[in-house]
Image (cartoon, rainbow, N blue to C red):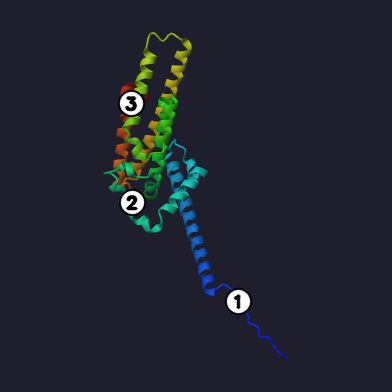
Amino acid sequence: MSCASSKSSPTRGTSPYKSKLRSNSKQNRDIRASKLQIKLETTQRDIFDWYELNEYKNDAGAIFSPEWQGRLIEWGKEFDSNSMSGICDDIKSYEKNPEELELGRLFQAHPVAAFSLWHVLQSCYELDRIICGTTMQNRSDIAEWQKRRPFQYFLSQDIARCWQKNLTDLLSESEAESCTDEFQREKLAKRLQRIAQAIHALKEAIETLTSVFEGRRKELANAFWMLKVVKENVDKRWPQMAGTQEEDRG
């Protein structure tokens, strides 16, 4: 009687060592995600509390919006804990090339200041649309402007020229004696009113930014150059409206 020998195939199983590595890797990811979420929530609360404490008029609640939630998660992943120690010291170096500073990098170093700067940008974007958004080409340009880094935007000469030209043309048109069309006069008046309201909102945003820098002077000691850049370059955009701004201050 012949007996056939049988060969058993080796069992393909998962190595306990590899399983442990995968388990540890998942645990590490979960821990990092948990730390990121805690940091995110703490930062949001710090910003909101600072705004509430100082009774700023800008809406601090925006920091809890889905837009900001996604933004903060993205920035938190971009700047890991190993690079955080050098970020604050790094901000000073951008004074030589401010156009390169990303809002996310600034936020990681100085969250309240970055959030306040974001509000200034939103007010400027609104004025972009009202002052310059009168043609399809300009609207296309405006979309590109608002993708720029913060100080790349503030230092832009093409944006300043567009504001100046459109404001000059608008004021000349509103003052022209030949403008007898009632509909046109009403249209101009409404646009000027919208501009005045937007300028008022921008002034409030800059006042808040200034207050943040003054109130957190010690931690922002190496970043005051940013406040100077914002104020100087916003002021350059409407020299012909100095009279209007003085009236608004009164």
Give how far across and how far down residue 224 sits, in percent: 30, 42
Q: Residues within 10 Å of mark 2 (few under 14, many from 20)?
A: some
Residue 11 tag number: 1
Residue at 68%, 86% (x, y): give it.
Answer: 4
| Residue 45 sits above or below residue 147 on the image | below
Question: How many numbered badges does the structure rendering display?
Answer: 3
Note whether residue 197 is visible. Answer: no
Q: Amino acid at mark 1?
A: Thr
Residue 79 tag number: none
2 vs 1, front mark: 1
Q: Amino acid at mark 3?
A: Trp
Q: Which residue is mark 3?
A: 238
Q: Earlier in the sequence, mark 3 or mark 1?
A: 1
Q: Earlier in the sequence, mark 2 or mark 1?
A: 1
Q: Quadrant of residue 12?
A: bottom right
3 vs 1, front mark: 1
Q: Residues within 10 Å of mark 1 (few under 14, many from 20)?
A: few
Q: Which residue is mark 2?
A: 88
